[in-house]
């Protein structure tokens, strides 16, 4: 695992130099993947790396774990509270659409959650522009394959250092990088709403997704869930489709 870590750190440095930027920034949520990325960018750019906490209707335990991670890794940090920004924007959109009597209450929770992810993305890019940094994403192989990320939210990044590693490998990497044990062992959550966990929402587990991705056998029910998620989210992994005058593609 140390060899993988060294290779990722080297890759991050090369991408930083290639883009002619000064450093790297990541959003630190209190979860496993962001903790690992924070530790990696700290190694890659010791004096030009930044971890940003962006509480927004967040579980207090996650905020505490984010701070614990930042302290353990020793990365420079910022905290930007997005509560008022989210309330203003979401409230205004809901009010204007409701005035047309077209607000879909059944879609409200997901619209709210996706806006949170996109506000965090916008915040990271505003900070990145200020410091001349690149935004580093946290998606692992399981999340990328199943599309378990918000398009133009946590999926809106410049670099994805963990996308070729399973959740189990990321957890192993976290231990090697000195991530706090409480973060390594906690239930994964995208912090989309109170009590939300990734595995409950997906209907399967990361262990089974990891097994599927590495060619192992899993129950047929889980295989169907994973393949359905992959097919439904293909658009998230593809570039924006362009119309060509000589034929649409």
Image (tube, rainbow, N blue to C red):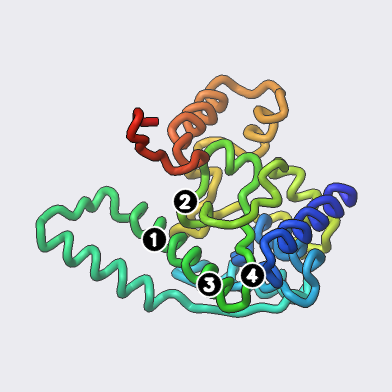
**Residue denoted by label 3:** 54
**Residue denoted by label 4:** 133
Q: Residue 130, can we see it?
A: yes
Q: CA distance from mark 3 to mark 2?
A: 16 Å
Left or right, residue 76 beside residue 201:
right
**Residue denoted by label 1:** 115
> Residue 104: x, y in percent?
21, 51
Left or right, residue 182 beside residue 83:
right
Q: Which mark is residue 150?
A: 2
Residue drawn where x is 71% and y is 69% of the image: 69
> Residue 161: x, y in percent?
70, 51
Mark 4 against mark 2, which lies toward the viewer? 4
Mark 1 crowdedness (10 Å alpha carbons): few <14, some 14-19, many ≥20: some
Q: Which mark is residue 243?
A: none
Mark 3 in CB contact with mark 1 (< 8 angstroms)? no
Q: Residue 182, can we see it?
A: no
């Amino acid at each position: 695992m140390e060899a993988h870590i060294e290779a990722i750190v080297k890759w991050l440095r090369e991408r930083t130099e290639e883009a002619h930027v000064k450093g790297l920034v990541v959003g630190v949520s209190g979860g496993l993947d962001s903790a690992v990325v924070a530790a990696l960018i700290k190694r890659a750019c010791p004096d030009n790396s930044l971890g940003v906490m962006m509480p927004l209707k967040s579980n207090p335990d996650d905020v505490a774990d984010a701070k614990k991670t930042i302290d353990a890794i020793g990365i420079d940090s910022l905290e930007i509270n997005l509560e008022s920004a989210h309330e203003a924007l979401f409230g205004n959109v809901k009010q204007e659409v409701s005035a047309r009597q077209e607000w879909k209450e059944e879609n409200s929770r997901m619209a709210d959650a996706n806006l949170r992810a996109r506000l965090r993305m916008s915040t990271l890019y505003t900070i990145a522009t200020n410091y001349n940094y690149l935004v580093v994403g946290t998606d692992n192989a399981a999340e990328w394959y199943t599309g378990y990320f918000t398009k133009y939210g946590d999926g809106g990044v410049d670099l994805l250092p963990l996308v070729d590693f399973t959740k189990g490998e990321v957890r192993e990497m976290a231990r090697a990088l000195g991530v706090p044990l409480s973060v390594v062992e906690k239930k994964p959550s995208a912090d989309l709403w109170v009590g939300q966990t990734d595995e409950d929402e997906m209907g399967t587990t990361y262990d089974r997704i990891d097994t599927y991705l590495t060619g192992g056998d899993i129950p047929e029910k889980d295989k169907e869930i994973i393949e359905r998620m992959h097919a439904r989210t293909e658009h998230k992994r593809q570039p924006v489709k362009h119309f060509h005058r000589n034929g649409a593609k």
